[in-house]
Amino acid sequence: MGEISDGSDPLVLAGRSFSSRLLLGTGKYASVDQMKAALAASGASIVTVAVRRIPLGDAGQAEFWSALRPYTLLPNTAGCHTAEDAVRTCRLAREAGAGDIVKLEVIGDKRTLFPDTGELLKAAPILVKEGFVVLPYTNDDPVVARRLEDAGCAAVMPLGAPIGSALGIRNPVNIRILRETVGVPVIVDAGVGTASDAAIAMELGCDGVLMNTGIAGARDPVLMAQAMREAVSAGRKAFLAGRVEPKLHASASSPLGGMIG
């Protein structure tokens, strides 16, 4: 297949193409300057912002929004615990000019931050009917993913591990089955801690990875952003190239025929 240059293998969401398959959050950085540098190093096209945590009235608000101007905004409903709250938050984001693409989160447990899939399945069709492009944060259940696709969601975003845990992909089998179950893009969201986690997600056939803590919480966020960029690219290439099937026993790398002696 040859080398894949930037932009030749885009992430497509609801008919829109994005050059990067790495999506980034904007929280937890030590400063706006650090966030700006990390976003640039990541090569991301899409950045997500928690609508309910936007620093309204903060002195750094103008600087914050200025730093996000080059990117496609993905407002999210972090902090919502009911379908009603999530729908209201998406409407407010659109009224504020954030656009129609939204990351839908409905949290069901405050300790683990696992999604409430029942409330998620209530909110998704309402938002789709109102013209939103819905990207739902969900668990790694293929049945729920299929129902979200049936509800009109433009992608599904299963967790790799609990939000902010940096545990990596805890259930690769479910992620792989989920990927084979739905026809919309699958973007791993939550739990990615280091570059190998991102590469594994992409090698499983996922279409993208969304992360925040893995980069913002690193000792050197800018360098980690670059590492994540390269890992997502490498994992995608490995998936497209098609790995050799694992074998229990050795297989000679060189042909055995014609050996001397």
Image (spheres, rainbow, N blue to C red):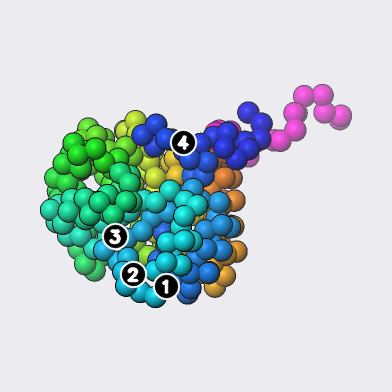
Callout 1 amino acid: Gly
Foreground of the two, 216 or 116: 216
Name the secondary structure under disc 4: strand
- Name the foreground residue: 209 vs 57: 57
Q: Earlier in the sequence, mark 1 or mark 2?
A: 2
Dots 1, 2 in contact, CB < 8 A: yes
Q: Amino acid at mark 4?
A: Ser
Residue 55 numbered mark, or none? 2
Give the distance between the C-alpha atoms of the residues marked 2 and 3, in whole angstroms: 9 Å
| Residue where numbered disc 1 is placed | 60
The percent coordinates of residue 49 (x first, y second) are 36, 58
- Which region is colored magenta? 239-261
N-terminal-most mark, 3 or 1:
3
Alpha carbon separation for disc pair 1 and 4: 31 Å
C-alpha span from label 4 to label 2: 30 Å
- Give the crowd class for mark 3: few <14, some 14-19, many >=20 residues within 10 Å: some
For mark 1, give the secondary structure: loop
